[in-house]
Image: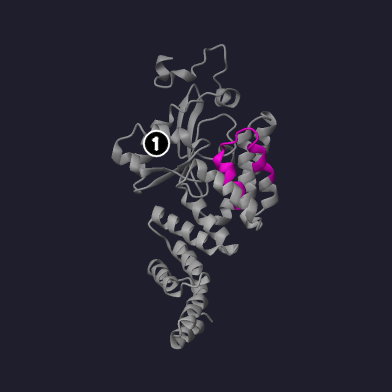
Amino acid sequence: MINDHPFQQVYFNNFISHEPGYLKNNYELEYWGCSVKQGIDHLLTTDSNPIIKINCLTNGLIERQVLLLPVDDRKRIQFADFEEADYFVSHLKNDPYANVFSNADYSITTLNSDILNIYKLEKDPAKQLKICEKLIVSAKNAKANDFNDIGTDYIIGSSFYKLGKDDSAIFYLQKVLPHDLSYVQAEKGLGHAYLDKQNYDSAEVYYKKVLEHTPDDADVINNLGVLYLNTKKYQLAIDEFNKGIALTHGNAVAYSNLGRSYYAAGQYNTALENFKKEFTLDSRNKSDYPVIGACWQMLGKKDSANKYQAMAK
């Protein structure tokens, strides 16, 4: 036990096998995630990026460990969704995410079993979809071992959503909520899936539930704006897009959406101001040229209107 310090909580005496991997495969060794702080320290030392995005099964675990860091290091660590994260941190037995990877970039081992693994995540979209397919199989296997594990339902549902299978995503994500009504990620996933299906009423219900728990979720606020734009509630759309821009200091997509909302509301000069901000950040979105041309047309500027209509072709 002394030799395993500071991870003596995973100690098993010699009446239990210490064969490689045996304890990890049969017992929940690192349930409280005490080794995660050491893993984060490793990333801070070896990854020079100013922001390091991390994912694990429970974001609260990362957040608690980050509080132990010096202030400057705290600013570098962010919890992110699986597809956006740089690393996945695994410390639990039968972790469905960990089962889809082959080699860890960093491990902590005691008694011949890994108690912590950190995996560098794939950024290629096609490879991410393959990982989602593997995740569904892995999570279903984990579910067979623990039928009451609602976390696996969330993993399966969110993976189906990323694969574009909204009905399957909704089926599994809804199974999470009766057990944990505050499972914000499941509510968020349901909002996304219903928005894709153009079931705007249901999407709005779940997005508002998310915002009750996390009122500064810029992703949900932006999608709520899209929902209102699609349902012709233009002032509500404008309000939501402005909230999102205030939280994120603006991005090209947000300004594009805001420009379209102002155009639909008949505020053509304000629409053009937001399109200008969009193109300052990213000048590649030609799909907005017809809308810009229409703004100029409504303002009586035919030359500018014709210019943008021609550029759109």
Residue 143 at least partly seen: yes
- In front here: 14 or 74? 74
Q: In this view, does 48 lie to the left or right of 287?
A: left
Secondary structure under the numbered disc 1 in the rendered image: helix
- The image shows residue 204 at horizontal and vertical percentages of 59, 51
- Colouring style: one colour
Please state the extent of the stretch shown in magenta in the rendering: 171-192
- The image shows residue 159 at horizontal and vertical percentages of 62, 47
Residue 163 at least partly seen: no
| Quadrant (top left, top right, bottom left, bottom right) of the C terminus | bottom right
| Quadrant (top left, top right, bottom left, bottom right) of the N terminus | top left
Residue 132 sits inside the magenta stretch = no
Residue at image point 49% right, 76% down: 289
Q: Quadrant of residue 7?
A: top left
- In front here: 114 or 213? 213
Our reading of the magenta stretch's main secondary structure is helix
Density class for disc 1 (Cα within 10 Å; few <14, some 14-19, many ≥20) is many
Q: Is residue 194 left or right of residue 115?
A: right
Give the amino acid type for the residue marked by disc 1 in the picture.
Ile
Q: In this view, does 191 lie to the left or right of 289?
A: right
- The image shows residue 298 at horizontal and vertical percentages of 49, 81
Residue 186 sits inside the magenta stretch = yes
- The image shows residue 74 at horizontal and vertical percentages of 34, 39
Residue at image point 55% right, 47% down: 208
Q: In which quarter of the image is residue 179?
A: top right
Residue at image point 51% right, 42% down: 212
Q: In which quarter of the image is residue 230?
A: bottom right
Residue with the mark numbered 1: 40
